[in-house]
């Protein structure tokens, strides 16, 4: 075995896919999740321990019993709109509880941490594609809650904690083998919402903002397949295990697709229309978010295996049709 990895939030969308890929690659995996957002049905790989990352005593016990080598963090609330309405919820879960986790790690001598951050830390882009050197000026409490953890990790680097921070653009798709997929409750991501609308599992899709200065007036995002995200996390883990120092990387495909282009891809894959309603812009949303992932490619040797939007959407459609 290559080592012991604790995945916090491992019953969720990205965490469950990462657990599968780590186990398949020969790592020993413990999943720690309070199941407030995750699903028991997604706990197919690794050893599950139910608990909250804000429970310091439970974490200290876990670190002592499991001899954990590294921690991967996926235990965040991720809805931009909700964060605007309930900022205290996001700063508590995403920031304060992560600080508790980091403190427990330090007390037990666990000094390798991989953090799922977000492109939302950049705010409204000053240039595109966005590199890691872009100024951070989040426009939502969600983005701010992640940036505060990034800042904490920068200070901990001087105290022996090495971390890899991944700033995600838009995670999408599903396990190509069909075992796992995206099941947020409530769902907030565009691709699964569009698929559900097309399959008449929900009301028509709301398109938030049709007057942006983009190719068709709708918001543009960079979509990256969930397995490609997880592949980067494993490379980041290997980087830290081999003595790598703290670093941060964008993860995206480097190409932007509008909301309307995503809907066309869903329609192409399913052969039915996506019923949609145009709505006003949503607070906290930037018009365009497209990332430059050159650094992850050069430093970690990362390369997306599923870069095509239609292929990403196809995996999501196949999973949704099984539910």
Image (cartoon, rainbow, N blue to C red):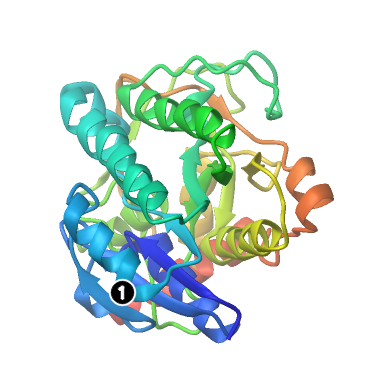
Closer to the camera in the image, 57 or 96: 57
Percent from the top left, x then y, of residue 252?
A: 64, 46
Number of residues whose C-alpha sits closer than 10 Å to that of mark 1, classed few (under 14), some (14–19) or many (20 or more): few
Residue 237, located in which quarter of the rendered image?
A: bottom right
Q: Is residue 225 above or below residue 119?
A: below
Query: Which residue is pictured at 32% across the width and 59% down the height?
Result: 9
Percent from the top left, x then y, of residue 142?
A: 34, 29
Residue 110 placement, left or right of 53: right
Residue 320 placement, left or right of 268: left
Could you tell me if residue 112 is visible in this image?
yes
Question: What residue does disc 1 label?
Answer: 65
Residue 29, located in which quarter of the rendered image?
A: bottom left
Percent from the top left, x then y, of residue 101?
A: 32, 47
Query: Which residue is pictured at 47% across the width and 69% down the height?
Result: 5
Percent from the top left, x then y, of residue 48?
A: 27, 77
Closer to the camera in the image, 283 or 165: 165
Question: SS for tag 1?
Answer: helix
Query: Which residue is pictured at 48% across the width and 47% down the height?
Result: 115
Residue 248, located in which quarter of the rendered image?
A: top right
């Amino acid at each position: 075995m290559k080592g012991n990895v604790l995945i916090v939030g491992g019953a969720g969308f990205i965490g469950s896919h990462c657990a599968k890929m780590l186990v398949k690659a020969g790592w020993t995996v413990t999943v720690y999740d309070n199941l407030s957002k995750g699903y028991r049905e997604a706990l197919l790989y690794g050893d599950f321990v139910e608990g909250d990352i804000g429970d310091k005593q439970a974490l200290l016990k876990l670190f002592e019993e499991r001899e954990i080598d590294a921690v991967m963090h996926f235990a965040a609330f991720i809805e931009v709109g909700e964060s605007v309405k309930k900022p205290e919820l996001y700063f508590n879960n995403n920031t304060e509880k992560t600080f508790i986790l980091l403190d427990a790690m330090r007390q037990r001598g666990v000094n390798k941490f991989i953090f799922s951050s977000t492109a939302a830390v950049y705010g409204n882009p000053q240039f595109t594609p966005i590199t890691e050197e872009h100024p951070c000026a989040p426009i939502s409490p969600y983005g701010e809650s992640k940036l505060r953890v990034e800042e904490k990790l920068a200070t901990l680097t001087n105290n022996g904690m090495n971390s890899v921070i991944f700033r995600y653009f838009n995670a999408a798709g599903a396990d190509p083998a069909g075992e796992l997929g995206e099941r947020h409750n409530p769902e907030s991501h565009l691709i699964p919402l569009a698929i559900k609308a097309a399959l008449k599992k929900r009301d028509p899709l709301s398109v938030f903002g049709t007057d942006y200065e983009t190719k068709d007036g709708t918001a543009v995002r960079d979509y990256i397949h969930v397995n490609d995200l997880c592949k980067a996390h494993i490379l980041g883990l290997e980087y830290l295990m081999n003595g790598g120092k703290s670093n941060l990387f964008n993860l995206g495909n480097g190409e932007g697709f509008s909301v309307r282009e995503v809907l066309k891809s869903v329609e192409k894959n399913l052969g039915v229309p996506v019923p949609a309603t145009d709505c006003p812009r949503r607070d906290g949303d930037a018009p365009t978010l497209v990332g430059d992932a050159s650094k992850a490619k050069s430093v970690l040797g990362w390369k997306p295996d599923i870069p095509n939007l239609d292929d990403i959407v196809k995996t999501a459609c196949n999973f949704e049709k099984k539910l």
